[in-house]
Amino acid sequence: MTSGLQKRVRHMSPLSLYLNCRNHRLALCFTHLLKKNETMADVEALLVSIWKVFHFSAKRHAVFRQMQELYDETPLTFIRAAATRWLSHLRACVSFISRYESLLYTLDTIFTETREPEIAGIRAKAADRKTVLTILLLSDVLKPVNHLSLYLQSDIGYFSSLTERVKACINELHGLIEQYEQGQFDDDLEFRKCDDLLNVISDRTDLARRLRDDNNQLTPHDYLQTVGIPMIPTHYRD
């Protein structure tokens, strides 16, 4: 509700009370996280850049479609990840993960043809180990949060079970942290695909660069301990 509409409603009904939209407040958490976390901001920028590459060019979208078919994948279209839309971020992350190799192949093909620095930059960021691991983690974190978000968007008319829903979300996040700490991932976790995606990066990186970077490679375990787990808001763990 806009401030102008709030004023008109209060003028017509002085005793009315305004309650902030719970779902919108939940969505704003991600916006605040982007402002404080450089890694998350990089992920946000990458997902939006990938969407732009294909959304504004039918030719590039056709190349991506051909590459997916080459990998025997059902062609999909990237959606825009909006900072205040949890569900769009989850879908964008899952699309990135499920089409990772064909996406890199597409970006390589486009760059070979155009030599555009912008494409080279997107390709480099998409092959950054920390960025990829963050997208895997974000996909797992957003799943329970989206369950709560969809509940808040539903036409329930009451919030008698809201406390239980919030607790369920918190418990799922606690369980996620425990799995990350133990290094044991359920089949439905996206982070279990970390080795597959990192192998794709190695396969598509020239030998000289691999040898140069071997001693500085970020492992999934190190990432979770130093970046991933601390990234999940600490109040979820209280």
Image (cartoon, helix red, strand yellow):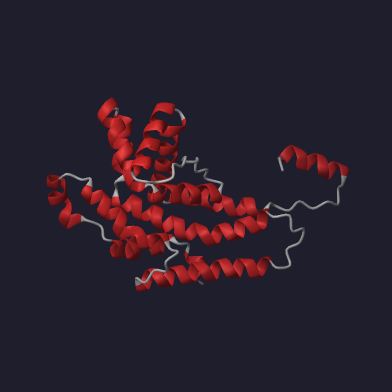
Q: Is residue 124 left or right of residue 33?
A: left
Identity of the residue drawn at 36% across and 33% down: 63
Foreground residue, 9 or 26?
26
Foreground residue, 58 or 26?
58
Name above or below for residue 193 compared with residue 55.
below
Identity of the residue drawn at 55% across and 59% down: 145
Q: Position of residue 173 (x, y in %)?
A: 49, 67
Q: Is residue 29 left or right of residue 72?
A: right
In this view of the protein, can residue 115 be seen by the observer? no
Identity of the residue drawn at 33% across and 37% down: 106
Q: In this view, does 210 lie to the left or right of 38?
A: left
Q: Where is residue 32 in the image (x, y as percent from the top left)?
A: 51, 50
Q: Position of residue 221 (x, y in %)?
A: 30, 65
Foreground residue, 108 or 7?
108
Give the number of marks.
Answer: 0
Name above or below for residue 113 compared with residue 16.
above
Identity of the residue drawn at 49% across and 51% down: 90
Residue 192 image-quadrant placement: bottom left
Q: Position of residue 101 (x, y in %)?
A: 32, 46
Please state, as top left, top right, bottom left or bottom right, where the N terminus lies in the image.
Answer: top right
In this view of the protein, can residue 27 be seen by the observer? yes
